[in-house]
Amino acid sequence: MVYDQRSALSNYISTLLSSGKVVFTAEEAKQALDIGRGAFLDAAGRLQRRKALLSPRRGFYVIVPPQYASWGAPPPAWYIDALMHHEKQAYYVGLLKAAELHGATHQAVMEFQVVAAKRLPRIRAGRNLIAFYYRKEVATVQVGIEERKTDTGMMKVSSAALTAFDLLRYPQASGGIDNIATVLSDLGAAIDSEQLGILSTVMERPVVQRLGYLLDRLGHDQVTHSMRSSLLATGSPRWTELDRKEASDPDFAPEPLERNERWRVIVRREPETDE
């Protein structure tokens, strides 16, 4: 009987794969196969041990197609939208992963980075690591969220403008100020100036200041005019550090090299970009 249940689940998975689907929920499988929870978990457990199936979240399953057996999972882009729908959470693929999708990266991105409206633990899915970064109100940046086609459907991705802001908003996830500058040097050409201005109204002012300074410095000053207008609409901002890490310890912080009046940014070390 156990063998039949496992075989039935295997056949169900094969049917899903043949129709281009790589995900299903426990409830969907139990209903389709007309089996109970215990029987399903037993069959699913056997397939998980054979590395044909994985469960990144309780009740949510990802099929591992044969061509991805050595990786232990298909690409996260294949199932991230379905996973976040299962979690009932607003999200978008962002940061360095989004920059890569926009053609702006100089090295392999080690994490599949997702910005979500809830604090979620990381997921190890085979060789892939899905890392989540928290933004309380994803709806406030909706203008900067795009839909991208994937091999199995769609996923939400931050636009070039929103990606640029997030690189400065989550500097540790972005590899530090040097890597941010390197990515922005390529990403700048894809940024929509009007969208940059709109997003500036909902971003933290220091983030807007740092991004404005870097884009100007990297030769993308043509896209920063509306952003600066949005920044100044509520008065002159306070001075902010370009790299908070550089100034974290007053006893060891380098003396400022520049105090940029246009963006009111204190620069203690010029960012270095990879050529």
Image (cartoon, rainbow, N blue to C red):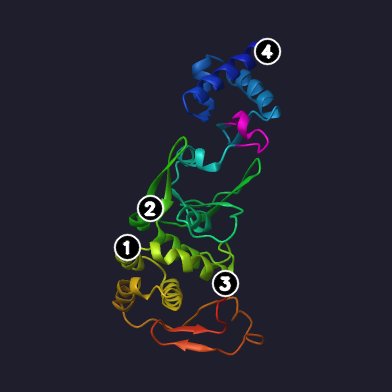
Q: Residue furthest front?
A: 275
Name the front one of labels 3 and 4: 3
Q: Is residue 64 magenta?
A: yes
CA–CA distance in space, label 3 to label 4: 56 Å
CA–CA distance in space, label 1 to label 3: 25 Å
What is the secondary structure assignment of the residue under circle 3?
A: helix
CA–CA distance in space, label 3 to label 2: 25 Å
* Mark 4 nearby-residue class (10 Å; few <14, some 14–19, many ≥20): few
* Mark 1 nearby-residue class (10 Å; few <14, some 14–19, many ≥20): some
Name the front one of labels 1 and 4: 1
Q: Quadrant of the C terminus?
A: bottom right
Residue 223, image x, y percentages: 34, 70
Residue 3: mark: 4
What is the secondary structure assignment of the residue under circle 4?
A: helix
Above or below, comparing residue 90 to residue 235 in the picture? above
Name the front one of labels 2 and 4: 2
The residue that mark 3 highlights is 178
* Mark 2 nearby-residue class (10 Å; few <14, some 14–19, many ≥20): many
* Quadrant position of residue 107: bottom right
Given the image, on which type of amino acid does mark 3 rest?
Answer: Asp
* Quadrant position of residue 237: bottom left
What is the secondary structure assignment of the residue under circle 2?
A: strand
Residue 195: mark: 1
Residue extent of the magenta highlight: 63-73
Name the front one of labels 1 and 3: 3
Looking at marks 1 and 4 on the same chain, the residue that comes earlier in the sequence is marked by 4
Looking at marks 3 and 4 on the same chain, the residue that comes earlier in the sequence is marked by 4
Image-based side of 235 in relation to 73, left or right: left
The residue that mark 2 highlights is 145
